[in-house]
Image: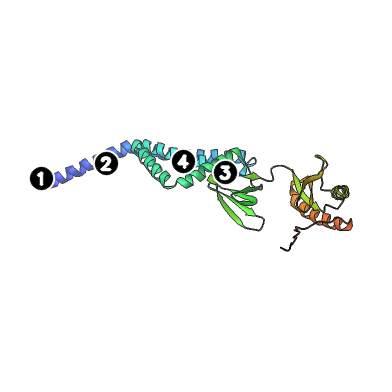
Amino acid sequence: MENLFSGEGQAAELLQQAMSMVMTYAPKVLLALLTLIVGLWLINRFISVLDKKLGAKDPTLNKFLCGLFGAILKVLLFISVASMVGIATTSFIAIIGAAGLAIGLALQGSLANFAGGVLILIFKPFKVGDTIEAQGYLGAVAEIQILYTIVNTFDNRRIVIPNGSLSNATLVNVSIYDKRRCDMTFGIHYDDDIDTAKAICQRLIEEDERSMTDPAPRIAVGSLGDNSVNLMVRVWVPTDDLWPYYWDMQEKVKKAFDAGNITIPFPQRDVHMYQAK
């Protein structure tokens, strides 16, 4: 009988302790759940508003900022909820810091690319659709990701360039301006008339509607080569027409020089032979 009463007493004591714990922690758990639900709703609402505000201005930067702010706010929310329940957040934060340090040491290259992506998105040396020359490649920017930039070359190759390299090296943004100077050099024979050759080039420039008059075209003798007099031709054209204009002008000048009896010389060398006595 004593054992029976003793077992009933222990059960009652455990039940009382359980009820006490429920009364103590139930409000905290309910409050933590409510905070979690409301906090997630507010974070999603904030990200939605941020997405609408920045979406029309810069879609690339918008995606990055929305993802970054969303992750940071959710981590802070979970830490706050854990502290409300009674979990020691000091040790939790220390564990996160140690894990972050270990991950950072293991992913130094990726972190450099991440920092480079942030710099590109902030300072905007180029944007999606621009034509750039970097790391030995020339092509159009297809995507600016947080770690890598995707460039499509004109021979239909997909190049993935780390953002760390792009942010720390020289790059050329070919399409940032709406006009570019087309530099061409045409060699003529030393016996040909320079003024006639210059007049032919001037006429071809004026006949092409892609040629811009401001700044004015420039035709001059650039150098006296070993085999030819080199005419330097400089014409400003719309950026999108640069290479088509260059290729068309090469063909037009060759045909016009042929029709005008202007010779385009090829490299040659005179060899004099002497017989030794």
Q: Are marks 4 and 2 in contact (CB under 8 Å)?
A: no
Disc 2 crowd, CA 10 A, few/some/many (<14, 14-19, 20+): few
Residue 169's tag is 3
Q: Quadrant of residue 56?
A: top right
In depth, the one of 150 and 67 nearer the eye is: 150
Give the residue at x 83% y 52%. Answer: 190
Mark 1 or mark 4, which is nearer to you?
4
Query: For the residues marked 4 and 2, what is the alpha-carbon distance in whole angstroms?
Result: 32 Å
Q: Position of residue 46 (x, y in %)?
A: 54, 38
Residue depicted at x 87% and y 50% = 193
**Horizontal side, residue 12 vs residue 246: left or right:** left
In front: label 1 or label 3: 3
Q: Nearer the viewer, residue 220 or 89?
A: 220
For residue 81, above or below residue 144: above
Marks 2/1 in contact by CB < 8 Å: the verdict is: no
Q: Choose the circle earlier in sequence order: 4 or 3.
A: 4
The C terminus lies in quadrant: bottom right
Please report the residue visible at 49 percent of the width from the left and 44 percent of the height from the top: 112
Q: Where residue 18 is drawn, which disc sits there?
A: 2
Residue 78 image point, x, y percent: 42, 40
Residue type at mark 3 is Ala
Relative placement, left or right, of 200 versus 76 is right
Q: Hey, what amino acid is under mark 1?
A: Glu
Residue type, mark 4 in image: Lys
The secondary element bearing badge 2 is classed as helix
Tell me how far mark 4 sits from mark 3, CA to CA: 35 Å
Residue position for label 1: 2
